[in-house]
Amino acid sequence: MLFYIFTMMKRPIFIALIVSHFLTVSAQSEPCKVLLESIAGEYKGKCLNGLANGKGKASGENTYIGNFLDGMPNGKGTMIYSNGDRFKGFWQAGLKHGQGEFEFEANGKRQKLTGYWSEGEYVGTTDPGSPYKITSVSGIPFYSVEQEESDENIIEISIKSAMTDFMPRDLMVVAPSADIIQKGKKTEIRNYFLPLSCEVNYTIKVAHDQRKICRFILEINADGKYIVTLSND
């Protein structure tokens, strides 16, 4: 009698275990789709509502390892292309979007491109969401741009040598439709419209009386005061 009662007590637990196992197997066998065609082959990872969601690995023509959202690469991840190229960085809706590093082969050599992408396109080394963008630098080993809150739009440029401000004789600052004002050994740019592209050109003396051309191009996209420091030390 006691054996019968004990067996009846265990039966609900046994049935519950069978049901739980069945549901687990069903969930694992549920197809989980990856919507980006180039990697839509084999998928291993987290799934939600029949789509890849969360961390996973998808392999097709290419292979992607990283985060997914609704079946598409989204967030941080690495794409390994069929030709051996590799992108490691951030994705949005299946496109490179944000900071990343792209390794590829060109002219028989491995190359590396770092910076920012927007909707699959490379946009440079500066975050496109930044209030400013440095678009070109040559001949200037050290430089900085600092933004400060201000009621006026001002760009203050200083050029340093031996840790002190100096004014190159051939300094040329170009800022279309803006006022360019010399204040001692500093240059101020005022009364401009956004976005503004500002270009600074000058030369410095190097060995054997030769001169090096220095060039700096800055694009301003937001209001405020910008302090630009260019150093040749």
Image (cartoon, helix red, strand yellow):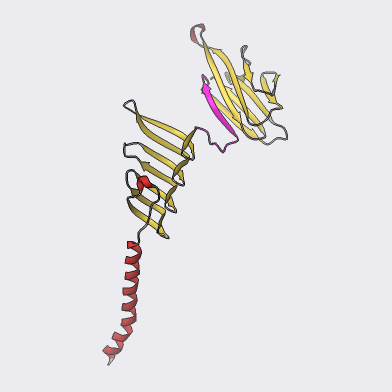
Q: Position of residue 132 (x, y in %)?
A: 59, 32
Location of residue 66 with respect to 231 vertically, above or below: below
Instruction: Pick the residue in front: 227 or 34.
Output: 34
| 127 in the magenta segment | yes
Q: Is residue 189 left or right of residue 204?
A: right
Residue under the point 69% across and 31% down: 153
Tell whether 93 sits left or right of 45.
right
Residue extending farthest to the front is 37
Looking at the rendering, in which quadrant would you find the N terminus?
Answer: bottom left
Q: Is residue 228 shown left or right of residue 12?
A: right
Q: Residue 106, position in %: x, y?
A: 35, 28
The answer to whether any part of residue 91 appears in the image is yes
98 or 82, which is in the foreground? 82
Q: Whole-percent x and y of residue 124?
A: 50, 32
Please report the bounds of the magenta region as a residue range.
125-141
Q: Is residue 64 visible?
A: no
Q: Residue at x 65, y 23 (%)?
A: 176
**Is 176 within the magenta?**
no
The residue lying at 37 percent from left, 34 percent from top is: 103
